[in-house]
């Protein structure tokens, strides 16, 4: 290329590159301009509230209180903020930490009066020449029951303005609702543990006695089998009675059921037949702890034990796309579905829950087990995931359930059990 043309071409290339850069900047600014000032402010408030919600929902331990108060101060827009109880400040962020005792006393006064307080410089005497605190707003975090044990204190450098007072009150009201939700979550966990304890209590009286009786019958005639049964019984009780979380895997539940059926086969001999059809891909699916075991025990205890001759329990778990479909079926004595129409709180989907036989006291325990499982399934996954029971006199019983493979309430660190989290 001639030398006299290279310089103009270089200049042209440079101008083209600069034009492209300017165009890119203009487009970027145009995109940023899509969000208005109001939209950006809304996003910022919601984002900050979301950051504060997590530690508030955790119950305000020392670490969580420190995280929460930082975001609450940003929501209020105060130079300093505190979360304080009736005896001490839980956490402080920003200015005014040396007024902790005064804020605690003011919080106690607010609790007693069940209202917020506005503090001025007269209420906050201080001998420190560098102190800039001239006022504060104290707002109890009130839950739905009207009680408050934590207050939000917003600190200012001047007399509190009406805008700060309103912002503090609204923020405290919102934070109180988050604490109420934390208490609700805790209550649900306690209820779930109580329901599992009820199932354990239902298992223990009859099954333990029958299992030990069956094992004792082999001690002299077949010591090796008696030893194996004792080990199976020990593993079954360890799984059923240990401190467990709310969820387990289908594989773990089936393993425990296999131990249960091994012991029952020792009792019934050839009379009890078992058929399993389990898709390997659904074994890791999580479901409520002791959710499948009561259905199998119900089939053996109430269906097959009263049937002369051979009886079969069939357990099937199929892969159904986003769900796992599980059925427990027996060819036992069955029942008349109309028998349960007079019962309280029956299982609400499909046929009424099974309550076979002539012993009302015995069948009441069975009803408790099925209702317990049904309610826990609905509580976790939704009403469409309750038990479906099909039965008729002399036609056996089939109990079906659907379990989502993935669910937001069933995740590591949120009560999902087994090896992830053990709850006392």
Image (tube, grey):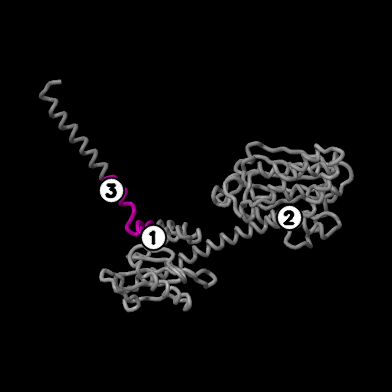
The quarter of the image holding the C terminus is: bottom right
Q: Residues within 10 Å of mark 1 (few under 14, many from 20)?
A: many
**Magenta stretch?**
26-45
Q: Nearer the viewer, residue 44 or 393?
A: 44
Residue 235 percent location from the top left of the image? 71, 44
Q: SS class of the residue under badge 2?
A: helix
Secondary structure mainly formed by the magenta segment = helix
Q: SS class of the residue under badge 3?
A: helix
The residue under label 3 is 29
Q: Residues within 10 Å of mark 2 (few under 14, many from 20)?
A: many
- Residue 369, disc: 2
For residue 235, above or below residue 123: above
Disc 3 and disc 1: Cα gap in Å?
Answer: 32 Å
Q: SS class of the residue under badge 1?
A: helix
Q: Residues within 10 Å of mark 3 (few under 14, many from 20)?
A: few
**Of marks 3 and 1, which one's residue comes earlier in the chain?**
3
């Amino acid at each position: 290329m001639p030398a006299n043309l290279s310089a103009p071409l270089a200049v042209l290339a440079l101008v083209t590159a600069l034009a492209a850069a300017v165009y890119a900047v203009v487009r970027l600014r145009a995109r940023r301009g899509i969000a208005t000032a109001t939209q950006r402010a809304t996003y910022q408030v919601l984002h900050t509230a979301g950051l504060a919600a997590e530690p508030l929902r955790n119950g305000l331990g020392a670490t969580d209180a420190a995280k929460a108060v930082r975001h609450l101060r940003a929501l209020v827009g105060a130079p300093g903020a505190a979360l304080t109880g009736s005896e001490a400040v839980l956490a402080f962020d920003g200015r005014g930490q040396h007024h902790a005792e005064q804020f605690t006393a003011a919080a106690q006064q607010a609790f007693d009066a069940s209202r917020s307080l506005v503090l001025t410089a007269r209420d906050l005497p201080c001998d420190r020449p560098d102190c800039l605190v001239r006022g504060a707003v104290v707002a109890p975090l009130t839950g739905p029951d009207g009680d408050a044990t934590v207050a939000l204190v917003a600190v200012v450098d001047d007399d509190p303005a009406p805008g700060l007072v309103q912002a503090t009150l609204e923020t405290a009201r919102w934070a109180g609702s988050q604490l109420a939700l934390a208490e609700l979550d805790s209550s649900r966990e306690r209820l779930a543990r109580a329901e599992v304890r009820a199932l354990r209590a239902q298992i223990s009286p009859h099954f333990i006695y029958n299992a030990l009786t069956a094992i004792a019958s082999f001690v002299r005639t077949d010591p090796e089998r008696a030893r194996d049964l004792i080990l199976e019984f020990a593993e079954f009780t360890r799984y059923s009675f240990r401190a467990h979380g709310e969820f387990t895997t289908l594989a773990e539940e089936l393993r425990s059921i296999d131990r249960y059926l091994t012991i029952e086969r020792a009792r019934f001999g050839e009379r009890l037949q078992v058929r399993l059809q389990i898709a390997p891909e659904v074994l890791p699916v999580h479901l409520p702890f002791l959710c499948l075991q009561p259905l199998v025990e119900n089939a053996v205890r109430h269906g097959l034990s009263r049937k002369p001759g051979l009886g079969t329990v069939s357990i099937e778990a199929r892969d159904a796309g986003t769900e796992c479909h599980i059925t427990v079926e027996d060819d036992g004595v069955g029942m008349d579905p109309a028998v349960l129409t007079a019962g309280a709180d029956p299982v609400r989907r499909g046929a009424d829950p099974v309550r076979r036989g002539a012993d009302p006291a015995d069948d009441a325990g069975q009803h408790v087990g099925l209702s317990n499982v049904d309610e826990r399934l609905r509580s976790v996954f939704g009403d469409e995931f309750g038990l479906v029971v099909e039965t008729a006199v002399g036609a056996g019983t089939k109990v079906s359930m659907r379990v989502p493979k993935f669910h937001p309430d069933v995740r590591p660190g949120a009560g999902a059990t087994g090896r992830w989290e053990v709850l006392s």
